[in-house]
Image (cartoon, rainbow, N blue to C red):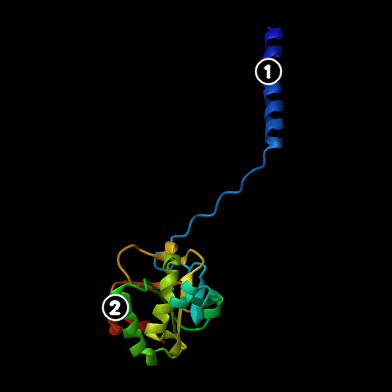
Amino acid sequence: MFHKLLTIFCVFLSLGVSAQKKDAGQTIKAPEPPKIDYTQIGAPMPTLELLMLDTVDKEVVRDGNWWFRMWHKTKTTEKTNKVVGKDFDSDANLLVMLFNPNCGHCIEQTDVMKKNMDLFKKSRLVMVANVKMKDYLPDFVKQRETKKYPKITVGIDNSNFVNETFLYRSLPQINVYSPSRKLLKVYNGDVAIDSLKPYIQ
């Protein structure tokens, strides 16, 4: 009987020692923080980084051979600036419009916003396009003349902002953020300026 008890004790002891050795070799992972749903009202504004592409100059590039004397090639030079969310820090609401430069509704909404820029005393409008729209942005900026309006910033998403906030309903989508950059309201599709007025400061 004593022999059986001694055997059982030794087995448990060896299991405990091997478990301690196993635990000693492993690192304990901290629990992952819960994923934030940035589409929910009250959610903080996710990281926002924009690339702004401006067509600086167009120059004709000619080659010395006879074929290029008949035809010329145009080269576009682009200037790229980066703007990040902290550049929009203020004590006013921030309107972020997700848009497609080729979308008719987005173009119309941009024109509505431009006509009412006198409402934007402290608030700003940030227009964010998906990275796939990079080639279309310079023409959009030029045709819509957005650079004439200091309260409008237009750029390409460089921080996954679109993927984290787009509801996949319709464009444009306007997210309204409080001065503490919490989501107050989301609009999809055409939005009348009267609906936006309570949020513009």
**Helix, strand or loop at disc 1?**
helix
Name the foreground residue: 67 vs 168.
67
Callout count: 2
Disc 1 marks a residue whose amino acid type is: Val
Disc 2 marks a residue whose amino acid type is: Val
Depth check, mark 1 against mark 2: the one in front is: 2
Q: Where 131 sits versus 72, above or below?
A: above
Residue of label 2? 191
The quadrant where residue 201 appears: bottom left
Residue 114, disc: none
The quadrant where residue 12 appears: top right
Mark 1–mark 2 Cα distance, whole angstroms, equals 73 Å
Q: Write the residue at 30% across / 67% down.
A: 170
Residue 74 x %, y % = 47, 77
The quadrant where residue 193 appears: bottom left
Residue 152 x %, y % = 44, 84
Q: Write the residue at 38% across / 65% down.
A: 166
Packing grade of label 2 (10 A; few <14, some 14-19, many >=20) is some
Residue of label 1? 11
**Helix, strand or loop at disc 2?**
loop
Q: Which label's residue is closer to the chain start, 1 or 2? A: 1
Q: Name the side, left or right, on which 104 lies relative to 148.
A: left
Name the foreground residue: 120 vs 115.
115
